[in-house]
Image (cartoon, rainbow, N blue to C red):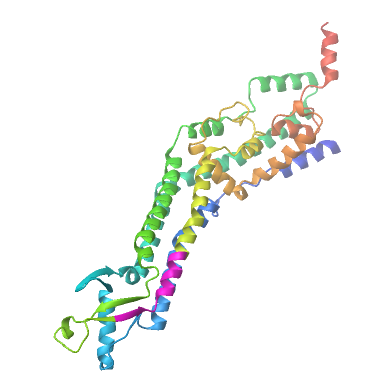
Amino acid sequence: MSLANAAAEYMLSDALLPDRRGPRLKGLRLELPLDRMVKFVAVGSPLLLMSLAFAQEFSSGSPISCFSPNNFSVRQAAYVDSSCWDSLVHHEQDEPGQYKMKSLWPHKALPYALLALAMVMYLPVLLWQYAAVPALSSDLLFIISELDKSYNRSIRLVQHMLKIRQKSSDPHVFWDELEKARKERYFEFPLLERYLACKQRSHSLVATYLLRNSLLLLFTSATYLYLGHFHLDVFFQEEFSCAIKTKLLRDETHVPDLITCRLTTLSVFQIVSLSSVVIYTLLVPVIVYNLTRLCRWDKRLLSIYEMLPAFDLLSRKMLGCPINDLNVILLFLRANISELISFSWLSVLCVLKDTTSQKHNIDTVVDFMTLLAGLEPSKPKHLTHRVCDEHP
């Protein structure tokens, strides 16, 4: 074996990807980075604000402070605070002798409303986990495995071609067989391409993804309505008039009908309300952007894998409307690009392909690796001329 052939063999052996057996792809990402960020913010921020509300309540004691009459004892004043917090109703005089009542219950329900909001925002995540993740994980495992195997098959094919060329005594026979194999498309392994083409006609993953983000937008809109309808009405009200002539104090003549109470937790209530509006307002453009990504193909990823034989979804214009399962799978392939070992090799080959002087003869990784191994990607001109001279 000559030094050139030995160097070609070593180069092709190094280009082969390691065979991944046993526990495979443990770090497979089944959520897109932006979706994960939306999940953490949409679910985590209400829980954080809820802990802030509880911490303020535990640290400051009573959430209200009522101005009881001077002749009240400490126990009577504590009873008034407890009674007014239980009722939490503001009595506003409308006409002489007539009072208009307004409930201030959003102050009392604040921590529990935040907990309910966090649980509701987690529902789209559960939908994705149970409706889409099992099928998506199996698709990604198969496609990633087949992409790497297809690359390895191409390298092994070039190794086999190099061995045949070394053993062949007549170069004409070798090149005739090679051209026949290319015409008959022996080098192509169309299983993966046909599988991806079938995914263009499937819509279960994309429907689940659209439903997940649509539910997030719906729940965000419901949050705006809740904050605008209930919180805005009591947002600036720090003091309220509480009726205390009830139960034990109903028959006490020296007790006034109404006393003034002050909400000591109003600042926390305002911070939580404003923070919720700001956080979910910032999330809306991110959710909308996640939806708009389904309206275009990731052609850069596809163009790199066009170097594989029988992977010409772009060149054959097989891509139609992007709203299908194939586009969702491509988004997750991009998110799991670290699991695609062949991607880095093919990216380098694409760069080298663009700089080579024989672009018209290089279509696949087989052609390029053939050239790097010292073989011409097509029949040499001197052999073609010799055939023409022998058969004028």
Q: Quadrant of residue 62?
A: bottom left
Q: How many labels were placed on the picture? A: 0
Vertical position of residue 317 compared to residue 235: above or below: above
Q: In this rendering, would 213 be left or right of 148?
A: left
Query: Percent x, y for residue 64?
Result: 34, 80
- Look at 31% across and 81% down and name the residue there: 260
Q: Is 265 part of what is drawn in magenta?
A: yes
Q: In this rendering, would 77 be left or right of 322?
A: left
Who is closer to the viewer here, 135 or 81? 81
Q: Quadrant of residue 368?
A: top right
Q: In this rendering, would 193 be left or right of 187?
A: left
Vertical position of residue 257 compared to residue 98: above or below: below
- Look at 35% across and 59% down and name the residue there: 229
Residue that extends furthest to the front in the rendered view of this protein: 96
Which quarter shows the C terminus? Answer: top right
- Look at 37% across and 83% down and name the residue there: 61
Who is closer to the viewer here, 290 or 250? 250
The magenta stretch spans which residues? 260-274
- Look at 13% across and 85% down and name the residue there: 251
Q: Is 109 part of what is drawn in magenta?
A: no
Query: Percent x, y for residue 24?
Result: 55, 51
Which quarter shows the N terminus? Answer: top right
